[in-house]
Image (cartoon, rainbow, N blue to C red):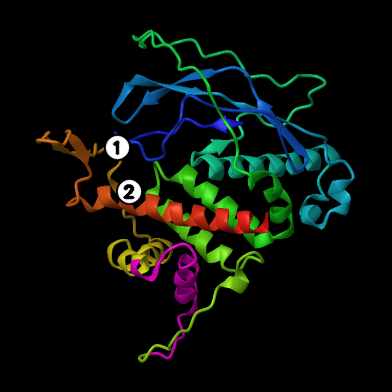
Amino acid sequence: MGPIPSPNPTGIIAVAHDRSATLDREYQIGPLRIRPGGNRLTEYVRSEPMALDGVTLFETWPVIAEGPWPGVAVQTDPDYQRLQSLPNQDANERVVAIWLHRVTSLLSLAVGEAWQVRTAAIDRSTRPPTVPEDWPPPDIWWRGEEGLDPVPRGLPDWVVPAWDFLTADEKLRAALTVWHQGLLLEPLFPSFAMVAYCGTIETIAHSDAMKERITFNVESCGECGNVPKAQARFWATVGLVKSSTEIEELKKTVNPYGRRSRTAHGSATHGIESMFGSMHYTVFAPPSPGQPATLKMDQQDETQMFMWRDVPMVRAIGADLLRLALASNA
């Protein structure tokens, strides 16, 4: 498992990648033991839509996960009841895939980068796990670029005990999964990433870890009498990690709940979905006395502000809430 190559269809990076980061040591997370893979993996990604005939370099230091086959757990654990009708081998592979997904989601949350299972579970007695050899450079690759030396990075203290809390809390598991899906969606489908990140906030509000912390008062609508509990609960949940002043600014400038609703219920898109292939350019500010030159977002460009201010802001709120829930349980 490791970071996956993320496209940058507008020319600006949506989800950052640390090409030198490697796991510092072994960790036991639930039934899985993860360890550094020991080798750099170099891949070449097409530069579309900027140039279909161009490539960019993508380097990672994958992690190897090992553990037992679930065996009788498939038949005895109520969490896997929906898999019991499958043949034994298929059911075992599905359960291991669930375990691997949970670990990659936790690693994504820990490092703020989109991790994914890169090789499906296999029997290590027939094929010992190892990082594959680098891809050969394509003919159009013209730079003999040397890879960066690895920089070992440890995992936060909450990661290892998080397994048991996620096992016991279905809503917390769902919130983590949908946040991870948002991270995967963000570079190409930012409007749907916003739906996912808002879903994280809405779902975590119902988790065992957080629901007792959330209190809110609402007034019914003067026009229809509806009591808007869903949106009130959303903002009360955000209030666990943001101040009231910050919330008012979020409502005014970002409006995540409204945008989420317009996409989920009205098919609205706010990012590049309907203009794929259009490059987005930052605003260059030349150097001045005491100030270096800078590149800034074009604040007049609503699409650019949505993708590089608004979506990352809501992503961070969801991540903060997940970490708060997991760390407070530790």
The answer to whether the residue labelled 2 contacts the one labelled 1, judged by CB atoms less than 8 Å apart, is yes
> Picture coordinates of residue 185 (x, y %)?
45, 45
Q: Amino acid at mark 1?
A: Thr
Q: Amino acid at mark 2?
A: Met
Q: Which residues are magenta?
A: 224-245
Q: Quadrant of the C terminus?
A: bottom right
Splitting the image into 4 quarters, where does residue 226 fall? bottom left
Splitting the image into 4 quarters, where does residue 204 fall? bottom right
> Does the magenta-highlighted stretch encompass residue 241?
yes
Query: Closest to the observer: 270 or 109?
Result: 109
Residue underneath mark 2: 307
Res. 307 visible in picture? yes
> Does the magenta-highlighted stretch encompass residue 148?
no
The residue at the point 36 percent across, 34 percent down is 8
Q: Is residue 215 left or right of residue 328?
A: left
Q: Is residue 87 left or right of residue 44?
A: right
> Picture coordinates of residue 302 (x, y %)?
23, 53
> Picture coordinates of residue 221 (x, y %)?
39, 88
The answer to whether residue 245 is above or below residue 54 is below
